[in-house]
Amino acid sequence: MGTGIVLEGGAMRGMFTAGVIDVMLENNIEFAGAVGVSAGAVFGCNLKSKQIGRAIRYNKRFAKDWRYCSVRSLLLTGDMFGAEFCYEKVPFHYDPFDLKTYRSNPMPLYAVMTDVDTGKAVYKRLDEGSGLDMLYFRASASMPLASRPVEILGRSYLDGGMTDSIPLRFMQKKGYEKNVVVLTQPQDYVKEPMRDMRVIGALLKKYPRMVRALGRRHIMYNKETAYVYKCRDEGSVFVIQPPEPLHINHTEHDPEELQRVYDIGRRTMEANLEDLKAFMNRGDGVKGPF
């Protein structure tokens, strides 16, 4: 089936992923399938629409606009990242999403979200890039407490990172034996349990199964990274990740900080470019390391 790509989330750590994707696009690197979680989905969609520079451009342009991301937006709309502004005004008016290219690109793109009632991951293939697809993109990146649940066809969803932060197994089950995994944390990162779970549980008591998933998220995440590195060592996965912690706020408003993390992504991808090409051109994706 060719090589798949898995894009982790991480809020504004996603600027690292944006830099990685732009270098891939500049070098005509294409994938047979893709899955993105949270920021990995909303920035990774530009891989399918082939819009080099779009993610860093609009994030810097609107970094200080309260409609894009602010406590004011949270208080007025219920969403830290303003739903109407981020998912209607920006992609269809201010920095248009190339729907024609997105729809004509045969690469399937999946987004991961969490069903707030079941506390389980849900995967949606997004072929249109608008309408319900944009709602699913929004759901994938809607962080609990900072966002309202996104209601779609009778179900309610929030951030996919709560239940499947690095959906490598999902891609393997789809038939992609060889995958590139873009992480936004360095290799020595270990996720710790969430603090203030009692407070979080009280605030989200309407969704006990989602709260349970949040309480176990660190276990899930650390198991998934361990599995990614195991597959890398066996030769079926190529990992791209920052060499050091990115140290960027989840709701970063400084355009220079966004540019800094984006540039780290570009440099990291450029340094790995030839090895990535060798990995993707290798016929057998399941035997020993290249």
Image (tube, rainbow, N blue to C red):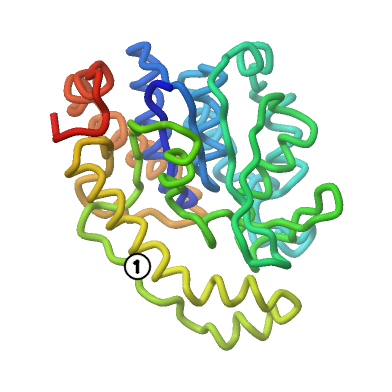
Q: In the orientation shown, which residue stands out farthest toward the right?
A: 154
Q: Position of residue 156 (x, y in %)?
A: 77, 58
Depth check: 44 or 230 in front?
230
Q: Secondary structure at mark 1?
A: loop
Residue indicated by mark 1: 191
Depth check: 289 or 156 in front?
289
- Tell me what residue is drawn at x 59 percent, y 41 percent: 111
Instruction: Judge whether 117 appears above or below 287 on screen.
Output: below
Task: Tell me the kind of residue under disc 1.
Answer: Lys
- Tell me what residue is drawn at x 33 percent, y 64 percent: 222
- Tell me what residue is drawn at x 53 percent, y 62 percent: 162
- Tell me what residue is drawn at x 70 percent, y 47 percent: 67
Is 141 left or right of 257, judged from the image as shown? right
Q: Position of residue 110 (x, y in %)?
A: 58, 36
Q: In the rendered image, which quarter is residue 64 located in?
A: top right
Instruction: Judge whether 257 appears above or below 34 on screen.
Output: below
Figure quadrant of the C terminus: top left
Figure quadrant of the N terminus: top left
Q: In the rendered image, which quarter is residue 155 located in?
A: bottom right
Number of labelled discs? 1
Q: Position of residue 233 (x, y in %)?
A: 17, 44
Is 194 left or right of 184, judged from the image as shown? right
Q: Position of residue 174 (x, y in %)?
A: 50, 36
